[in-house]
Amino acid sequence: MEYLPNILFAIILVLGIGYFARNIKKLIRNIKLGQEVDASDNKSLRWKNVINIALGQSKMVKRPVSGFLHVIVYVGFIIINIEVLEIIIDGLFGTHRIGLKLLPESVYGFLIGAFEILAVLVLVSVIAFWIRRNVIKLKRFLSSEMKGWPKSDGNIILYFEVVLMCLFLVMNATDTSFQNLGHGNVISQFIAPWFGDNPDTLHMIERTAWWLHIVGILIFLNYLYFSKHLHILLAFPNTYYGSVEPKGKLNNLEAVTNEVKLMMDPNADPFAAPAEGAEEEAPAKFGASDVMDLNQIQLLNAYTCTECGRCTSACPANLTGKKLSPRKIMMDTRDRLEEVGKNIDANKGEFKDDGKQLLGDYITNEELWACTTCNACVEECPVSINPLSIILEMRRYLVMEQSAAPMELNNMMTNIENNGAPWPYNQMDRLNWKDE
Ligand code: SF4
Ligand code: SF4
């Protein structure tokens, strides 16, 4: 019976981490449903992006208020959770505050004191976030795609953080031996009197807060998979694999480029063998109509999206009332990918055609053609997501597989084909305007 709490702790820990690992395996499997893509170039620039953008939050702070609050929550949450290490060791081996045995008292006190200050800063920031979402009601959190689960998700995570930070402070405030140390209780010493001085009651509250704290952290960890907060983990690989090409560079299909070159070169031999390194054949399908046609980085992008709406708030199409939100493009891609993943799970590892696809069932042609390809969404995204690349792949499918471009574009392409220019008259007439 003496070891019962330790055994219970070990079981909870294994279950919590095991379920999380199972979902991460599923997530990786889903991402691998996408097309392979070579991102082995520019390693040093990619690592620089991870350090600046993911670790240094350089793009977050471009909007100072939310950026600053986010940095506090991010730093606070990560650092405070170092303390979880101590909880795990204590839980497994039945020790109490093992850090005090491993570190000098002053160092331990300094660390816990810093964690307590950070906990209060996190609490203040989280409350400010809640007010921005629910009282001030910032426009970018009110779009149609943010109704229902995305709205609740944004709030649930804030409540989680409040509860975890409070439990941490209560745990310290009711730990008599820690309070008697006189080091590190910079905040909890002011809360301690709220709980009285009965040693049994204090011990019971301290143990309850300790258990709830670790169970809460494991629930939080497992909640991530179902939440936009997966970005806490995925922002790092996502910024590594983010594009390092100039933003205006479009991804041309080599097979199509070669066709055009052949058409434009009267001396070209259409039967000549392709140049070394060139694609030998046209792809089996042009563009993307479903998530499996997108590449793995685009699918990773979808799982990483924080639903912050910075992209949508800078999108000229959205700002002028068009039915396009780059945030929704990412959310739809993730939802469809999850749907495909569940289909595979339900059919013993095989995808069974469900008569649905990303194009049409989630994202409409109207949304796709509203995009001006300005790249503002890509520039704004704090975690290097590229909604435009998905839009372009789906447009490519519409044009090349379905000949379903809008009439204006079809007219222009016919003009280019017939007149060598986008205008509906002969090249010989192009200077007629001067005679008017
Ligand atoms: S590239 Fe398209 S989706 Fe992105 S901001 Fe510009 S118009 Fe909007
Ligand atoms: S794509 Fe980027 S900017 Fe847009 S909502 Fe997602 S994380 Fe925010």
Image (tube, rainbow, N blue to C red):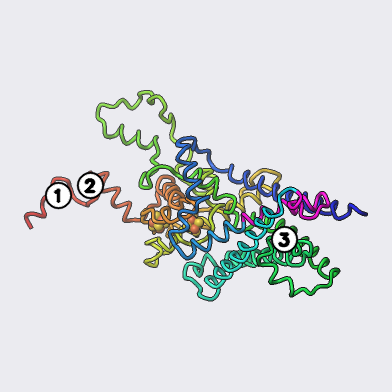
Percent from the top left, x then y, of residue 10? 81, 50
Identity of the residue drawn at 35% across and 33% down = 258
Q: Which mark is residue 430?
A: 1
Q: Quadrant of residue 114?
A: bottom right
* Of the two numbered discs 3 and 2 in the rendering, the one whose residue sits closer to the viewer: 3
- Check whether the beta carbons of the residues at disc 1 and disc 2 lie within 8 A of each other: yes
Q: Amino acid at mark 2?
A: Ala
- The residue at the far right in this view is 1
Percent from the top left, x then y, of residue 142? 50, 70
Is residue 94 inside the magenta stretch? yes
How many angstroms separate mark 1 from mark 2 (CA)? 10 Å
How many angstroms separate mark 3 from mark 2 (CA)? 64 Å
Q: Which residue is mark 3?
A: 216
Question: In the displayed structure, does residue 247 sit left or right of residue 165?
Answer: left
- Check whether the beta carbons of the residues at disc 3 and disc 1 lie within 8 A of each other: no
Which residue range is magenta in the image? Answer: 78-101
- Check whether the beta carbons of the residues at disc 3 and disc 2 lie within 8 A of each other: no
Q: Amino acid at mark 3?
A: Gly
Q: Which residue is mark 2?
A: 421
Q: Residues within 10 Å of mark 3 (few under 14, many from 20)?
A: some
Q: How many marks?
A: 3
Identity of the residue drawn at 53% across and 55% down = 305
Q: Amino acid at mark 1?
A: Arg
User: Can residue 299 be seen?
Assistant: yes
